[in-house]
């Protein structure tokens, strides 16, 4: 979802002024500067070999002690980096008090065996070794690993689990991109009670998708990024939140989108703002073309819908502060602007140009088949609300969708409910063709696409390389846990 309105100076000024009055001022630590590339593990001699464990312990979050789930005690988790052709070996130990597993979101690797297999259940105390190879033709970009055991996903991601998985590739070899300074922004919200623990969410918060009022970038509140005048910044953004959407804008600076969900565009696209829903990633370039000053990276108000479902009694509670133990999002937060990070100017370089061309995005042939999916919710006796795809809640034993490898399909996803749902497909990326019948304005690869309440989104996908069973689901992880997920079996064509 990209806002394509052309830039004009007046809009920028208006944006600056209105957000100044509405901005949510972080009451905690502000203005910390970003640590240089923390906790990176980079493949060597064709192998990325690391030990990861999921654990529950006290960590430092935005300057305070918090009891969170983490990989290796780090928030955000260690950043993994490999190249096409590399092997990946992750010796994973589950030190959580509950079962879990790991999903490699967006990677085009087998969804089976000890690769990206989300049906695995790794019990508490057990070790499991993930092993897979990044295909030689894998696009370079920003990917995302997180737990994916149905029923536990929202809780475990919200408690802190998740990290970036970088594939270095063709985009990184473009000289203008190489000249840019690379900054990762891993966006994640938390909810902590007065003791620094993550409270159980209210039932309604779970229905809406739990959000927390502590909004962080790389585990910090409002870190500072710097750019030299004339320079270029390459921001790699991951929405690692359980449910929160980020409608991003950088004061007085256009965003030049260069990659979506880990895959490069054919040329930069200039945007005024960028909506990043859970699971989505984006890479943007920022030019140091303004007067040296401080500019806020903002998360502008966004209403995900569904507030009508909340009883009147729920609405009255103010849940902005820490220590409410609420896990509860109220509309007032959806109406406020937040300051995610601050851009400052430091130094000066000769003006760096934007790249003209990036990596060609192929045009997929016409589909051999069209399928339709309806996203909605319903009531189930004793369970309250359930979230459904084509009228059914998730069942890992059922195969909902059977496809043949090396075929092209169009999927038409219609959201007939009252809440927005970001729809995600594992293993194979797709291209959005149209939204409510309107063609997309530029071609891009995606693995997660927002389907707003009332919308129909059509995308085109080619199933390649890997047979086996995996899933598609809403990436508001509470909705996924509450049933909005289906299985897909990819079969070798006979
Ligand atoms: Cu990031 Cu199936 O999810
Ligand atoms: Cu995924
Ligand atoms: Cu949803």
Image (cartoon, rainbow, N blue to C red):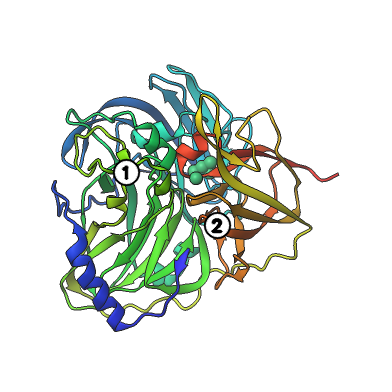
What's the residue at 46%, 48% (across, down)? Answer: 279
Q: Which residue is mark 1?
A: 329
What's the residue at 51%, 64% (across, down)? Answer: 264
Question: CB of residue at label 1: within 8 Å of ligand 3?
Answer: no
Q: Which residue is mark 2?
A: 454
Q: Residue furthest right?
A: 494
Question: In this rendering, is residue 67 above or below 183?
Answer: above
Pick the front one: 332 or 368:
332
Question: In this rendering, is residue 56 above or below 43?
Answer: above
What's the residue at 51%, 38% (across, down)? Answer: 480
Q: Say what secondary structure mark 1 lies in.
A: loop
Label 2 – label 1 distance at C-alpha: 22 Å
The quadrant in which residue 490 appears is top right
Question: In this rendering, is residue 12 above or below 200?
Answer: below
Pick the front one: 23 or 189:
23
State whether residue 39 appears in this view: no
Q: Residue furthest top?
A: 125
What's the residue at 68%, 43% (across, down)? Answer: 466
- Position of residue 425 in the picture relative to residue 78 (left or right): right
Label 2 neighbour load within 10 Å: few <14, some 14-19, many 20+: some
């Amino acid at each position: 979802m990209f806002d394509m309105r052309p830039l004009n100076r007046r809009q920028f000024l208006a944006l600056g002024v209105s957000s100044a009055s509405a901005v949510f001022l972080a009451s905690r630590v502000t203005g910390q500067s970003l640590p240089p590339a923390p906790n990176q593990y980079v493949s060597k001699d064709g192998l990325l070999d690391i030990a990861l464990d999921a654990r529950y312990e006290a960590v430092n979050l935005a300057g305070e002690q918090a009891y969170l789930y983490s990989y290796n005690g780090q928030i955000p988790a260690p950043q993994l980096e490999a190249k096409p052709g590399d092997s990946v070996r992750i010796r994973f130990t589950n030190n959580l008090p509950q079962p879990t597993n790991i999903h490699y979101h967006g990677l085009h690797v087998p969804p089976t065996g000890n690769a990206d297999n989300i049906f695995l259940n790794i019990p508490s105390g057990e070790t499991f070794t993930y092993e897979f190879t990044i295909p030689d033709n894998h696009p370079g970009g920003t990917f995302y690993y997180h737990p994916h055991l149905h029923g536990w996903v929202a809780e475990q991601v919200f408690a802190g689990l998740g990290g970036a998985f970088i594939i270095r590739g063709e985009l990184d070899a473009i000289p203008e991109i190489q000249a840019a300074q690379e900054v990762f922004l891993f966006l994640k919200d938390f909810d902590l009670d007065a003791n620094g623990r993550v409270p159980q969410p209210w039932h309604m918060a779970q229905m809406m998708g739990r959000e927390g009022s502590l909004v962080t970038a790389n585990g910090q509140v409002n870190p500072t990024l710097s750019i030299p005048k004339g320079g270029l910044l390459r921001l790699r953004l991951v929405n690692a939140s359980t449910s929160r959407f980020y409608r991003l804008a950088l004061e007085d600076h256009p965003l030049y989108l260069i990659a979506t969900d880990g895959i490069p565009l054919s040329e930069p696209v200039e945007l005024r703002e960028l909506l990043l829903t859970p699971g989505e990633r984006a890479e943007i370039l920022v030019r140091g073309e303004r007067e040296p000053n401080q500019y806020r990276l903002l998360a502008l108000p966004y209403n995900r819908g569904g507030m009508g479902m909340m009883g009147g009694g729920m609405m009255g509670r103010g849940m902005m502060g820490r220590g409410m133990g609420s896990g509860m999002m109220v509309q007032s937060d959806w109406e406020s602007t937040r300051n995610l990070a601050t851009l400052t100017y430091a130094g000066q370089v000769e003006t760096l140009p934007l790249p003209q061309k990036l990596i060609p995005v192929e045009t997929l042939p016409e589909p051999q088949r069209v399928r339709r999916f309806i996203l909605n919710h319903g009531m189930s006796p004793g369970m309250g609300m359930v979230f459904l795809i084509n009228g059914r809640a998730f069942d890992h034993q059922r195969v909902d969708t059977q496809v043949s490898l090396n075929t092209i399909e169009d999927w038409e996803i219609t959201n007939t409910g009252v809440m927005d749902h970001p729809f995600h497909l594992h293993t194979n990326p797709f291209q959005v063709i149209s939204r409510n019948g309107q063609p997309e304005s530029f071609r891009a690869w995606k693995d997660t696409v927002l389907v707003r309440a009332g919308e129909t989104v059509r995308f085109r996908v080619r199933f390649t390389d890997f047979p086996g069973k995996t899933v598609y689901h809403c990436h508001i992880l509470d909705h996924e846990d509450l049933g909005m997920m289906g299985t897909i079996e990819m079969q070798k064509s006979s």
